[in-house]
Image (cartoon, rainbow, N blue to C red):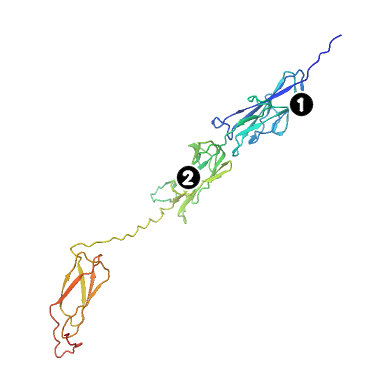
Amino acid sequence: EESATVTGPAMLAATLTYTSDDADGSGDVTSNDVITYTATINNTGESAAASVAYTAPVPQHTTYIAGSTTLNGSATTDISGGPVTVGSIPAGGSAVITYRVRVNLPVPEGVSSVSTQGSVTAQELAAVLTDDPAEDTPNSPTMFPVRRTLPVLSATLVGILSDVDGSGGLTANDLIDYIVTVENSGTGPATSTEMILAVPQGTVYVPGSTFVNSEAAPDMTNGAVMLDTLRPGQRRVISFQVRASADLTGLTTVAVQASVVANPGISLLSDNPVTPEQGDATVINVQGTTEPPATPPTTTEEVTATTPAPVVTEEVIATTPAPVVTEEVIVTTPPVVTEEPVVITPTFTPTMTHTPTLTLTPTNTPTFTPTMTLTPTAPPPDPPDNTDPVATEEPAA
């Protein structure tokens, strides 16, 4: 009798590994890096495994790259849509499935790793979980550390006036060169970056004048310039020209401000770097208009008079007939400052009454109170007999 040959069953095992393209060269897995997963299914049994299929979820904090799934090097249905049909794997045979995902931007705060695990099913066999061969524990999920990064964008806008006529401001047909600088000072890339700017009122865009990092770029026909991805430390410098319109009536300034949008959820306005304000527009004066100069402060000076004493002009007003008065002015040093005029009424002892009025008005800025001695040289004469005196008053005793 011939003995029957007994064949053992199929036996499947699967591993799942990953590689990173390290797009930013940081040495770590960070946002926007592409992860390539490789699932290897081995049949270590003695029989073929039939109806083999592989299933794996897209890992959290990543996005599947459509069309990236392959089976044994050939494109196949996307793994994101369900199981990948492998078919039959002979005894001792294997199948290799690859697919790619991109790390989301940004990675949520507190997330430090991303893990996933696939499963293999076959006819008449129990499902098998994938194993990370880098781990000692059997059937462990495949995990990679991720470093959270965020882009930080800033934008400045300066305007340089070609003042052809030397007016000191913008006039018809003058040129303005605008320069926008967008920089990423963060730790992560900014994707789909775009600079948007409307040509300012009173100017016309000069065709063919747009450049990005000194290379010619498409005209700003729609007011936007695409900057694509800005990685940490990168910058884009956009330059373009406008020409002042022939008619600037009603305009005193030409103001412009750019906006920058990017992923993830970035939106900001340009800043004028020549002013201390943050986030302000860039302004150029029209026809030499400028801000009025500041009014100089009014200062008060204290003046100290020195010897010789200031000159005093005295106005003497007397009733008719006026006496002849000789005045000796004695000024003490230093003078006492006062601003009010000094009215002095001298007293005489004439045979008739008269009241001369003396008004002293200083001509210099410092004022003072002089000490004055008035010495009349003679009393007024007696009125003639045929003259009717103004007033008669007995002399004082």
- Quadrant of the rendering where the C terminus is positioned: bottom left
Residue closest to the far top: 1
Q: Say which of 140 and 266 sits in front.
A: 140
Label pair 2/1, CB-CB below 8 angstroms: no
Which amino acid type is marked by label 1?
Ala
Distance in Å between CA atoms under marks 2 and 1? 65 Å
Q: Say which of 148 and 90 sits in front.
A: 148
In the rendered structure, the answer to whether residue 324 lies left or right of residue 171 reads left
- Secondary structure, mark 2, is strand
- Disc 1 target residue: 126
- Secondary structure, mark 1, is strand
- Disc 2 target residue: 157
Classify 320 as above or below 251.
below
Classify 185 as above or below 249.
above
Query: How far across and how far down the image is residue 248, in percent?
Result: 46, 54
- Quadrant of the rendering where the N terminus is positioned: top right
In the rendered structure, the answer to whether residue 386 lies left or right of residue 188 reads left
Which amino acid type is marked by label 2?
Leu
Query: How far across and how far down the image is residue 305, in percent?
Result: 22, 62
Classify 319 as above or below 172.
below
